[in-house]
Image (spheres, rainbow, N blue to C red):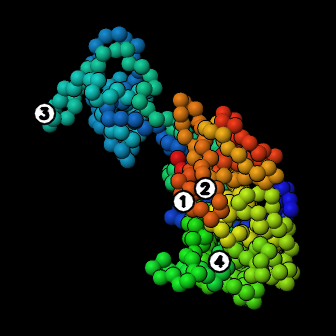
Amino acid sequence: MISYQESLQRIKAATSDFHLETQPCGLDDLLGRVLAETITSPANLPGFDNSAMDGFAVRANPKEELIDLEVHGNIAAGETPEAEVGSGAVQIMTGAPVPNGCETVIPIENVQVTADANGLPASIKVQGPILADQNIRRAGQDVRQGELVFSAGQKISAEHIMMLAALGISQAQVLTRPKISLISTGAELVDDPNAPLLAGQIRNSNQPFLATSLQSWPVETTQVTGHPDTKEQFLELLQHEISNGAQIVISTGAVSMGDRDFVPESLQEIGANIVFHKCKIRPGKPVLFAVLPDGGLFFGLPGNPVSAAVGFSFFVEPILRQILNQKEPETKMARLSKDFNKRAGFYLFAKARVFMKDSECQIEVLSGQQSFRIAPLAEANCWAELPEYLAEIKAGELVKFHKFAGVL
């Protein structure tokens, strides 16, 4: 049985040659995808000098006196200035191009306006001095043409799409979505939450958890129907998913040492390379990882729900980050709020809750750490990571933690 660190090293080494194809993707489908190319700006943003507010475009003037300026027309957003403005002023709207010769924009609320017979500004008075470069958005002030905008590996958010649209970039090369199949083993499982349970049956909670967790990743997920309870049934489903293009298979259950724990034997039978089976962690000791004959990846997670959650967070997600060129999350630490004891020799991923107290980040390891207990997991907002050499952790010691996805 190997350590968690060694198991992760083995997985990453075994998947170093795993790569995804690329494909063009339009803005409408770009959210959450991962860039496969570097994007540089094809133009300046803004593309031209424009007004940051409604007001009057004028030349700068150093005089510290009341300045009287004649108004020569107006410019709205989307219009083109007809000519260079001389010593007067031009009424200008937010976003409109600044005329040649104008060096600044005076907000409309800072001038005295004299209107003509049609109610249009004829002249303005403003208290000097008039400073240059006020209230003008300069061409390229946000992004300059040729400047790096996004690097390959960037996961695209709505804010990134805003930038691409503003630059006139209609599509980008992205990594294809890896195809993931989820298999839940065990004839005792019931998928329909409305179906009454017969004696010995339990509801399938692992597959909804995994499917929901994968929604935040740019992947294609298939929830396999049917719950194999024999090696033959399992192999039939597994081969079906492989033939349908599954690149990653995640199964839950049947990886321990019981009579019905057929996953390891099934993988050996089809010639898969079992990279490791069992790891010195709790919960989730029986976890298994293998490379399938076609190069696909197989994660065999234990069936207890918290074990499956740990397996996903600390084995599946690191590999998704690797193949999707994503950075590892920043290590976070908090002070333990009260003493906690664990069994030495096992790396513990504990249900925990992190919180602020007295301007300090603190963490509480919750009671109910058994792998079947979901209620403490629902109360938790993070995993506390406690190394195998520790048995007794005192209040006040620093503890590494990983926030759950979606937790602020």
Rendered position, 120 above or below 126 = below
Please indicate, yes or no, whether residue 406 appears anywhere in the rendered image: no
Going from N to C along the chain, the mark reached first, 3 or 1, is 3
Q: How many residues crowd around disc 1 within 10 Å: few (fewer than 14), some, or many (20 or more)?
A: few
**Discs 3/1, front:** 1
**Discs 2/4, front:** 2
**Mark 2 → mark 4, Cα distance in angstroms:** 24 Å
Residue drawn 75% across and 81% down?
260
**Mark 3 → mark 2, Cα distance in angstroms:** 81 Å
Going from N to C along the chain, the mark reached first, 4 or 1, is 4
Quarter of the view holding residue 188: bottom right
**Mark 1 → mark 2, Cα distance in angstroms:** 8 Å
**Mark 3 → mark 4, Cα distance in angstroms:** 81 Å
**Discs 3/2, front:** 2
Residue marked by disc 3:
117
- On residue 184, which mark appears? 4
Going from N to C along the chain, the mark reached first, 3 or 4, is 3
**Discs 3/4, front:** 4
Residue sitting at the far top: 64
Going from N to C along the chain, the mark reached first, 1 or 2, is 2
- On residue 368, which mark appears? 2
Residue drawn 69% across and 82% down?
241
Judging from the image, what secondary structure is the residue with disc 4 in? strand
Residue drawn 51% across and 38% down?
139
Left or right of residue 389, residue 121 in this image: left
Judging from the image, what secondary structure is the residue with disc 2 in? loop
> What's the amino acid at mark 4?
Ser
> What's the amino acid at mark 2?
Gly
**Mark 3 → mark 1, Cα distance in angstroms:** 76 Å
